[in-house]
Image: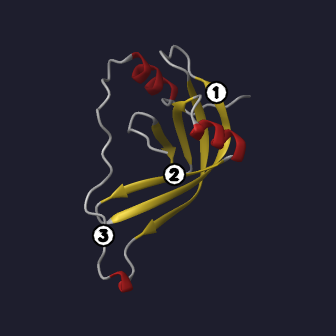
Amino acid sequence: MLLSYIEIRAYDAATLGLVIDAGSGTARNLSRHGVATLLIVEPGTTMYVKSRLIDGPLEVAAAARDLAYFLLAVDDVLEDSAAEWEGGAQITSGVQYRPLPSLDAPWVRATLAAVAVPRARV
């Protein structure tokens, strides 16, 4: 899944909150399979954050579009770098998210409010 910095929040080393389009394939797959792998791609390193669903999808109040909140547990974090036989092959730039969303956009405000604190059904 491709996320901006607005749509994901680490509450601690073991718990993540994430807000995505409720009708997306990612939301359907996360609901169906209960697992997600988040990739962090930066020059010199790639990280894989393996996680499982704790709860979700939960409604995101006051969103200008149909958004869903998911609470994830981090199961493992793997770091990948070029093997010796790859001859120093490397990623030279990170993935860029464009255009940058306006922090005043209603969906951004709703998303930031939704990921502010972890939540799950009681």
> Residue 38 location, x and y as percent?
50, 51
Which label's residue is closer to the chain start, 1 or 2? 2
Image colouring: secondary structure
> The residue under label 2 is which amino acid type?
Ala
Residue placed under numbered mark 2 in the picture: 13
Classify residue 102 as left or right of residue 15.
left
Residue placed under numbered mark 1 in the picture: 58
* Secondary structure type for disc 1: strand
- Going 59% across and 38% down the picture, which residue do you hit? 25
> Mark 1, mark 2: which one is toward the viewer?
1
Residue closest to the eye, 64 or 10:
64
Q: Is residue 84 above or below residue 91?
A: below
* Secondary structure type for disc 3: loop
> Residue 33 location, x and y as percent?
70, 47
Residue closest to the eye, 61 or 94:
94
- Going 52% across and 37% down the picture, which residue do you hit? 18
Q: Counting other residues with Cα less than 10 Å from the Cα at mark 3, is it few (<14), some (14-19), or many (20 or more)?
A: some
Proximity of marks 3 and 1: CB atoms separated by less than 8 Å: no
Q: CA distance from mark 3 to mark 1?
A: 38 Å
Q: Which mark is residue 90?
A: 3
- Which residue is at the far front? 25
> The residue under label 1 is which amino acid type?
Leu
Q: How many marks?
A: 3
Q: CA distance from mark 2 to mark 3?
A: 27 Å
Q: Which mark is residue 8?
A: none
> Mark 2, mark 3: which one is toward the viewer?
3
- Which residue is at the far right? 122
- Going 30% across and 54% down the picture, which residue do you hit? 94
